[in-house]
Image (spheres, rainbow, N blue to C red):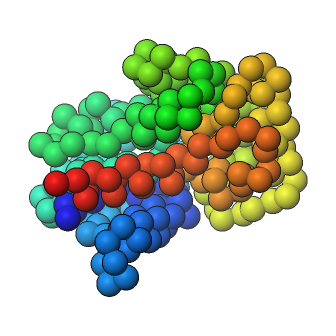
Amino acid sequence: MKTIGLIGGMSWESSAEYYRICNETVQSRLDGSHSAKIIMWSVDFAPIADLQHEGHWDELSSILSHAALSLEKAGADMIVICTNTMHCLADEIAETVNIPLIHIADAAAAAVKSDGLKTVGLLGTSFTMEQGFYRDRIEENYDLDVIIPNAADRDSVHTIIYEELVRGTISETSRQNYQESVARLVARGAQGVILGCTEIGLLLRPEDCDVPLYDTAKIHALAAVEAALKT
């Protein structure tokens, strides 16, 4: 079994899900006494969030590249960034190490394609929804159409992530807000929705919507386990 290197803490709530899913999946795939080989580098999210909103992406690249290099030196066989937003720096981070980086958008797009969908909605931070690093990768590499919410919904989705979900707050009002955003995406042609923030799956459940929801934290963690168990 290979060792999974997790860059976590963005936020710790979703990073804990990665750890749980990886271990539960390895236990299920092998037997009851097995667990995943994991090394985690967990950052303090508050300064990371500040740097994101201030646009200091070069500084963020240095922080996460250092984390990736530290994981490699510690014995990790792959890098998994436990957040969608920071994949805007995935190429730069990957260049600092000699081990593969498992890209969260690739894992999500592969799951959507396997279900035969053509058009998918995307929820996430404003960075993930509005910048091209995520949508363009999916559309260009997987022949999928990606729809993002309208401006008001994007603002609401982003605010709930940073003011509630990364702080462990789960609100029924916010769940309804997300359900309404999903419904508007579906009305515009989305056949499913990528939960492109690793905390959204803590709030929005499969039974909350009438279309498939692609929880990127779960999908990404499963992709890491597949890579770890591949011979």
Q: Residue at x 22, y 53 (%)?
A: 230
Give percent across and percent down for residue 109.
48, 32
Q: Tell which of 213 and 87 is nearer to you.
A: 213
Of the 4 image quadrants, the one containing the C terminus is: bottom left
Q: Tell which of 104 and 173 is nearer to you.
A: 104
Give percent across and percent down for residue 2.
19, 61
Q: Residue at x 25, y 57 (%)?
A: 228
* Relative vertical location of residue 127 with respect to residue 74 in this rendering, above or below: above
Residue 133 appears left or right of 89:
right
Evaluate whether residue 8 shows in this view: yes
Q: Residue at x 15, y 64 (%)?
A: 74
Of the 4 image quadrants, the one containing the N terminus is: bottom left
Give percent across and percent down for residue 107.
42, 39
Q: Residue at x 60, y 37 (%)?
A: 194
Evaluate whether residue 56 shows in this view: no
* Relative vertical location of residue 164 with respect to residue 144 in this rendering, above or below: below
Residue 2 appears left or right of 164:
left
Give percent across and percent down for residue 225.
33, 57
Residue 59 appears left or right of 74:
right
Q: Tell which of 196 and 229 is nearer to you.
A: 229
Q: Give the image quarter of residue 77.
A: bottom left
Picture mark count: 0
